[in-house]
Image (cartoon, rainbow, N blue to C red):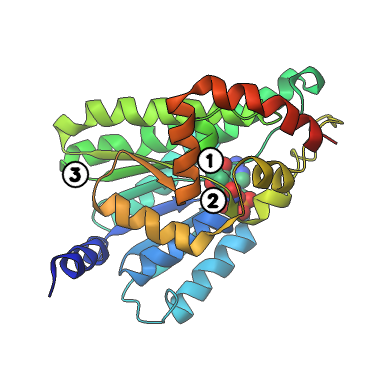
Amino acid sequence: MGRSSDKAAMQRAHFDGAAAIVTGAASGIGKALATELVRRGATVLVADIDSEGAQAVAADLRRHGGSGGQSQGGALAATLDVTDADAVAESVGIFATEHGGLDFMFNNAGIPVGGEVSDLSVAHWQRALDVNVMSVVHGVAAAYPRMIERGRGHIVNTASLAGLVPSPLLVPYSTTKHAVVGLSVGLRMEAAKHGVRVSVVCPGVIETPLLDKGNPADLPPATSTPDIRALLTELIGKPYPAASLARDVLDNVALNRPIIVAPRRAKAVWAAYRFSPRLLVDRSPKRVRSISR
Ligand SMILES: NC(=O)c1ccc[n+]([C@@H]2O[C@H](COP(=O)([O-])OP(=O)(O)OC[C@H]3O[C@@H](n4cnc5c(N)ncnc54)[C@H](O)[C@@H]3O)[C@@H](O)[C@H]2O)c1
């Protein structure tokens, strides 16, 4: 076996027999992460506010395993609203107790909230903070003490490229994702002494139902809510498959990378912003105006 196939085998074996929770796993990136985890031999709690969706994903994973059907892992479903701290603590507690501990906590659930800031109410900001930031806080509060106690475990938070690079028309979303990056990297630096790992995932544009969603329907309508698919495709590039992202993420989690940016196009945008923030910021307004509806 060559060195690169040794590395690939290590990246796969890393999850074999592990117990993992994935929030927002009824759809999109969470579903793809759960599928790839099961394919690599993990037992996964598919947790989502969409109860039927979570059950359907878990049942499908039990029947077919991950793609290829060679899984040794398992899947269970839980109805979970990540904005509810007590509910998150309860789900984590039950799953960790039943599986002899929790190896991976993927705080992945999230929603888009956008529109021109002048059109948005405090309720838009509050919802974005509750679902995208407090969800991660709740996941950390529930999982981290258990991981410290065992001296191991890995927390993986889904932020976004919008957590590294500002995103006009998605300012509340981008604000929350910057918070998730800050939380994750700072926590990683504290957690190392306890043997606990923390990574943050910053995907570019990923082909999931989120691209065709607007703001939550119960919030006051904002006329400038962007067409997210058109906006992100224009600013970042063509959507990347969720299954490919999930493989990239798990390969990098196995290597304990701190900030996981994928696909390559997203890395290029981040690199360009770091090289010259002005270049990106000054170029954007014209392109954004052409996309605003
Ligand atoms: N799709 C992209 O291009 C993209 C890019 C960067 C980051 N992300 C992030 O990836 C994560 C997953 O997004 P996705 O694209 O798979 O979206 P998605 O809409 O396909 O899936 C999100 C899932 O989260 C669940 N969810 C929403 N609110 C919840 C709550 N309160 N409690 C529990 N579950 C809840 C939904 O029911 C859904 O199943 C999000 O955090 C998102 O911000 C997505």
Above or below, 86 relative to 54: above
Residue topped by disc 3: 152
Residue located 24% across and 27% down the image: 189
Q: Which mark is residue 24?
A: 2
Residue located 60% across and 49% down the image: 237
Residue located 27% across and 31% down the image: 188
Is ligand 1 less than 8 Å from the beta carbon at label 2? yes
Q: Residues within 10 Å of mark 1 (few under 14, many from 20)?
A: many
Is ligand 1 less than 8 Å from the beta carbon at label 1? yes
Q: Nearer the viewer, residue 220 or 119?
A: 119
Q: Residues within 10 Å of mark 3 (few under 14, many from 20)?
A: some
Residue topped by disc 1: 82
Q: Which mark is residue 119?
A: none
Determine whether, in the image, residue 134 is placed left or right of residue 231. left
Q: Could you say where residue 258 lies in the image, as x and y percent from the top left?
A: 30, 38
Q: Quadrant of residue 194?
A: top left
Camera-side mark, 2 or 1:
2
Q: Secondary structure at mark 1?
A: loop
Distance between the alpha carbons at the discs numbered 3 and 2: 24 Å
Q: Secondary structure at mark 3?
A: loop
Distance between the alpha carbons at the discs numbered 1 and 3: 23 Å
Q: Could you say where residue 13 lies in the image, as x and y percent from the top left?
A: 22, 66
Mark 1 belongs to which amino acid?
Val
